[in-house]
Image (cartoon, grey):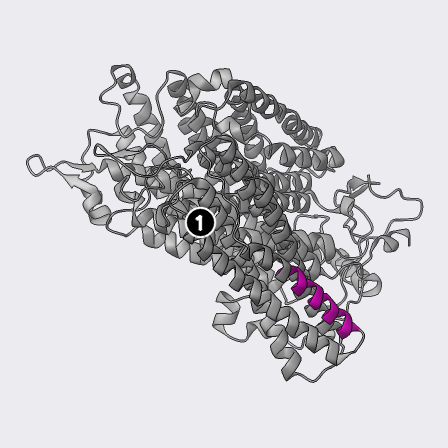
Amino acid sequence: MSNITIQEDDVLIKEQGFNDHFHDHHHGDKYKTNFLSHYVFSTDHKMISKQFLITGMFWAVIGAAFSVIFRLQLGFPEESLTWIKPLLGKWIVVDPTTGIGKLAPDFYYALVTMHGTVLVFFVLTAGLSGTFSNLLIPFQIGARDMASPFMNMLSYLFFFAAGVLMFYSLFVSTGPFAGGWVAYPPLSALPQASSGSGTGMTLWLISLVLFVISVVLGGINYITTVLNLRTKGMHMFRLPLTIWAFFITAIVGLLTFPVLASGFFMLIADRSLGTSFFLSDIFIAGEALDRVGGSPILYQHLFWFLGHPEVYIIILPAMGIVSEVMSVHARKPIFGYRAMIYSLMTIAFMSCIVWAHHMFVSGINPFLANFFSFFTILIAVPSSVKVFNWLTTLYGGNIRLNTAMLFTLGFVTLFISGGLTGIFMGNHVLDIQMHDTYFIVAHFHLVMGVAAFFGMFSGIYHWFPKMYSRFMNETLGKIHFWGTLICAYAIFWPQHYLGLAGVPRRYYSFDAFEAFKYFANMNKFISIFAIIAFFLQLLFLINFFYSIWHGKKMTSKNPYGSNTLEWTTPIEPIHGNWPGNLPVVHRWAYDYNKDEREFVMQHVPLKEGEVGDH
Amino acid sequence: MAELIRYNPGKIHPQKFALWVGMAGIAMMFAALTSAYIVKQAAGNWLEFSFPNHFYFSTISILLSSVFLHQSFVGYKAGNERVYKLFLFAGFIFGSAFVVLQYFGWQALYGMGVDMKGNASGGFFYLITGLHVIHVLGGIAALLITIFNAFSLKFKVTEKRKLRYDLVINYWHFVDILWVYLFIFLLVIK
C-alpha cells in the first residue's frame, strides 16, 4: 500500500471524521504513568487484550503439558516415568525393586480433569474471546475504549484470581480435582470421594465461580460497547463479522454462565452446608450417608445448560475471526454476509436448547431424547450455511497463502471433519454405543478444540501487528501451521476407530481388556504425534515472544489492504485509539475488488452513483 | 446524510444499559435456581411448610423502600433537597429492615424444624433467599455510598449525579422486583 493512500486516510478522518472532544479532556497518556497501572491494573482495552492472551498462553502450555503426560501413560504404559519424578514428585510411584516409575492412577484422572478445565475455560474462553473481543470491539466499531474500562479491568483481574487459585490447587498435597472437568456429583460433592475431591475440589469450585464473574463482567461490557459506542454510520449491518460473533458470544455467555453459577452454589451447599441437592443413597465403606433425596441428574442439567452453549462460546469467536481474515486474504467480499449473521444467531439460539444430548445415557426419558436429538442434528443446517459461505468466499478469490490465511483454511477443514461426526453423536440411538468412547474425544477435539485453536492462531498472526506494531515470522508460522495440521489429524483421526471399537475414554490402562490390547500401537502412534504437536506450539511461542521485540516492523498503517477501522489507527497504539476525530463509516466492511478498486476502507465515502453496502 | 440519522448516541446511557444487561445475568441465575426447584419438586420427596410471618413483613418493607427511594429520586430531580434526603434515608432504613427481617425469618423457620440438612425444599428456600439477600446487600452498599454523598457533598443537581443515583435506584427496584417474584414463586409452588 502506498503512502499516498495513508495520507488520504488521515485527511479523510481529519476532515470528515466525528469530533467527540475526547482529546480535549485527556492530556497525555494518564494510564502510562507507572508500571503497575500500565501492565497490571490497566483499563486500556489493548493492554487488557494482551493480558488475556498471555495468561491464556501460560495456561495453554500447562494444559497441553498435562495432555503430554497422560499420553505418555497411554502410549507407553510399559516405560518407566522416573525421569519426570523431579517435576511430579509423589505422583510418580517408583517400584523399589525394579526402579520403574509409574504415573499414580489418581493423578492420571487429575491430569485429564485439569486438561479439560484449563483448556475449555481458561484458554479457549478467556484466552480466545477475552483477547479478541477486547482488542477488536473498540477498534472495529470506532470507539475510544470499552463502555466501562474499569469493569473491563475487573474482568481480567477476576480471571487472574481464578487462575491463581487453580494453579495453587495443582500443588496441594491431596492433588487437584480428579473427577472430570464436568465435576459431576457425587465425586465433586463429597470431599471423601477421592483424594482430589477435598481441598482440590474446593479450590476448583471457588476458582470457577470467580471465572464466571469474569466472563459475565466481560460480557456485559462487550454487549454494551457494541450496542452503544459504535461510531457514526456504523449501523449493525455494517459491522465486521468478528464483532457480530463476539457480540452473540457475549449474549450466550451472559445467559448461560449464571446458570452454571447456580449449579456451583448448590454444589458448594452440598459440600459445605450439608444440603442434599445432588446426593442420595450414598454408601461409603458400607456405611449409608444420611444425605437422601437429591438427584445427580439435576446437576447435569444445570451444568450442561452452560456446558453445551460453552462449546459455541468457544467456536463462535473463532468463526468470526475466520470470516474476517478469509475475506481480507481472499481479496473478496465475504459471501452471504447476512446469512453469516443469521446463522450465528441460529447456532447461538439452538445451542441453548440441546444441552441434554450430553445426557443420553444418564437415564433421561428416551422420548425426551428425541427432542434433543432433533435439534442437535438441526444445528448442522446453520453450520453448513457457514461452511458453504466460506468455501464460496474462497472460490475465485485472489488468495494470499500467508500464515493467518493458512490457519483459516485449516479451521474450515477441521470444522468440517469434526462437525460431521457431530451428526453421529447427536443421534441418541448411535450415542448409546459411542458415548464416553474415543469417538467423542476425537469429535470434540477436532471441531471445537483444535478448530478453535486454529481460529485463535489465525487471529494472532493476523492482528499481531495491531498488538505489537511488528509482524510475526512467516516461515516459522508456516512450519507451525503444517506441523500442527498434520499432528491434529494424526492424533484425532485414529481415535475415531478406537471409539468405534468401543475403547472408553478416561481409562488409565487397557491391560485388563483383551479386546483393546490390539490398539497398543495405535495409542503409541497418537502419543508420538501429541508430543510433536506440543513442541510445535513451543515453536509458536518462541516466534510470538521473539517477534514482540525483534519482529519485522510495521511500516504502513494498513499492511494487508484491509477495510476495517483498526487499520486507520496509528502504528504505535495510543490512548483513545485515534489521535483526532473518530472515523465516520460509510460502507460495510467487505468492499474488496469493487469498481476496480482492490479494497475500499469503511470510512471512505461513497462515490457519486455508487451503491453502498451489499 | 441518511446514515447519520441512524446514529443516536443519546438514547440510553451506556452505563445504565450495562446495568440492565447485568441484571439479565442475575435474573438468569435465579431462573436456573427456580427451575431446578420445580424439577426437584416434581421428583417427589418434598416437604411442604408455611412461611413465618417475617417474610410477609419483609416483603412489605422492601416494597416500601422502593417507593421511598423513587420519591427521593423524583425530589432530587426537582431540586428539592429535603424530600431527596428524607426519603433516601427512609428507603435505606426500610431496605435494611428487609435484610434483618429475612434473618429473623430464617431463625423462625429453623425453629420450626426446617433446616438445610433435611428435605431439599428447605435447602432450596435458604439458598434462594440467601443468594437474594447477598444481592440486596450489594444494593445497601450502594445506598450507603449515596447517603454518604448526599450528606457530605453540597446539594447540586448535575447530570452525572443524576445518572449515578438513577443507577442505584434501578438496581434497587430490580432486587425488589426479584424478591417479589421469588416470594410469589415460593408461596405458590410449595
Would residue B11 appear left or right of A72 to someone viewing this image? right
The image quadrant of residue A160 is bottom left
The percent position of residue A430, horizontal first and vertical second, equals 48, 16
The percent position of residue A525, horizontal first and vertical second, equals 33, 26
At horizontal 71% and vertical 64% (from top left) the residue drawn is B67
Q: Residue furthest left?
A: A97
The percent position of residue A576, horizontal first and vertical second, equals 67, 66
Q: Is residue B73 magenta?
A: yes
The percent position of residue A42, horizontal first and vertical second, equals 54, 66
Q: Crowdedness of circle 1 by 10 Å Cα count: few (<14), some, many (20+)?
A: many
Would residue A400 appear left or right of A108 to someone viewing this image? right
A204 up-or-down from A357: above or below: below
A151 up-or-down from A264: above or below: below
At horizontal 52% and vertical 69% (from top left) the residue drawn is A38
- Image quadrant where one finds the C terminus of chain A: top right
Q: Chain of mark 1?
A: A
Instruction: Determine whether the residue tagged by mark 1 lies in a helix, strand or loop.
Output: helix
Q: Nearer the viewer, residue A235 or A217?
A: A217
Residue A438 visible? The answer is yes
Disc 1 marks a residue whose amino acid type is Leu
Residue A572 visible? The answer is no
A331 up-or-down from A576: above or below: above
The image quadrant of residue A332 is top right
At horizontal 48% and vertical 49% (from top left) the residue drawn is B127
Q: Residue furthest right?
A: A609
Residue beneath label 1, please? A208
Q: Which residues are drawn in magenta? A: B62-77
Q: Nearer the viewer, residue A252 or A47?
A: A252
Report the predominant secondary structure element of the magenta stretch: helix
Would residue A103 appear left or right of A264 to someone viewing this image? left
Q: Nearer the viewer, residue A390 or B152?
A: B152
At horizontal 62% and vertical 27% (from top left) the residue drawn is A379
